[in-house]
Image (cartoon, rainbow, N blue to C red):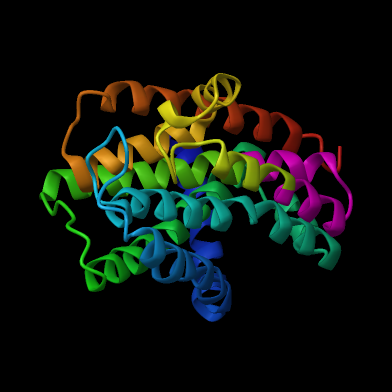
Amino acid sequence: MLALFEKSAVVLELELRKMMHDQSDIIIRTIQPVLWLTIFGSVFGQLRQVPLSGVPYLAYMTPGVLAQSVLFMAIFTGVSLVWERDLGQLDRLLCAPIPRTAIVLGKALTGGVKGLFQAGIIFAIALVMGVSIIFNPLYMAAVIAVVLLFGICFSSLSIFVMTLLKTRERVMGIVQLITMPLFFASNALYPIELMPRWLQAISFANPMTYVVAALRALMITGDLSGLPTDLAGMGLATVIFVVLASAAFRKIGA
């Protein structure tokens, strides 16, 4: 296991070097959450509070926008892998003496680290807009852990999708098909209790619901009563997606 983590860290370092060389991806992915907070959030922020929660709407949606930005950053990990496969870079990586599970973990960790950059930007914008965020050091450490775990979870899902499809167009199409329902069928923008029952059932099975709930508890409300359940839901989804991605990735080039 130690060797696996060491080689995963090697892949992570390689990806971070590429990210620091070209930071345009992070900048581009920042535009959408900024628009959500400044335009959508400003308009709906006129609501005094969110029904059933007692939290001002702008504060309520901030963890949801953070989760959305991390989701969009992580889910495009598979798209970048398709580019690497088309350019032949992936073949060279597969020939290296690195277990393919380590490659998956390294790539997935990169999605989590990129998510942390997004989180910093969202925090700054939210503070400028007057959102009251809990800056307890333990809570902030937990937020970092949740963002990393969320990035690993959906980066792994993206890698799994990439292994099943052969073209960038198909991967991007499936990515769009996955991300929007995940976002809108969660508690990112509105409480689950306001949804119709059939959508509530989908929301309870949606990993993003648990991510947003955990972030909202740590950043906004301070109510940690549901945090163990949220972490368990995220952890289960992450294990499932990492196992699926690793199993499928082993078949590449086989």
Q: Name the residue rendered at 44%, 37% in the picture.
A: 187
Q: Name the residue rendered at 48%, 61% in the picture.
A: 13
Q: Name the residue rendered at 12%, 50% in the picture.
A: 137
Image location of residue 106, percent across then percent down: 54, 49
Image location of residue 141, percent across then percent down: 22, 47
Q: Quick check: is 166 in the magenta stretch?
A: yes
Q: Quick check: is 172 in the magenta stretch?
A: yes
Q: Name the residue rendered at 68%, 42% in the picture.
A: 178
Q: Nearer the viewer, residue 149 or 225?
A: 225
The correct choice, above or below, for 23 with respect to 82 in the image is below
In the figure, is residue 158 to the left or right of 166?
left
Magenta stretch prevailing secondary structure: helix
Q: Nearer the viewer, residue 40 or 212?
A: 40
Q: Nearer the viewer, residue 175 or 180?
A: 180
- Name the image quarter holding the C terminus: top right
The correct choice, above or below, for 113 with respect to 178 in the image is below
- Answer whether residue 1 is visible to the viewer in this image: no
In the figure, is residue 227 to the left or right of 133?
right
The correct choice, above or below, for 173 with respect to 154 in the image is below
The correct choice, above or below, for 61 with respect to 215 in the image is below
Q: Nearer the viewer, residue 220 or 145?
A: 220
In the figure, is residue 6 to the left or right of 185?
left
Please tell me how many numbered marks the rendered image carries: 0
- Answer whether residue 9 is visible to the viewer in this image: yes
| Quarter assignment of residue 247 | top right
Q: Give the magenta range.
A: 157-176
Residue pushed farthest left?
Answer: 136
Image location of residue 14, percent across then percent down: 55, 64
Image location of residue 31, percent across then percent down: 51, 73
| Quarter assignment of residue 250 | top right
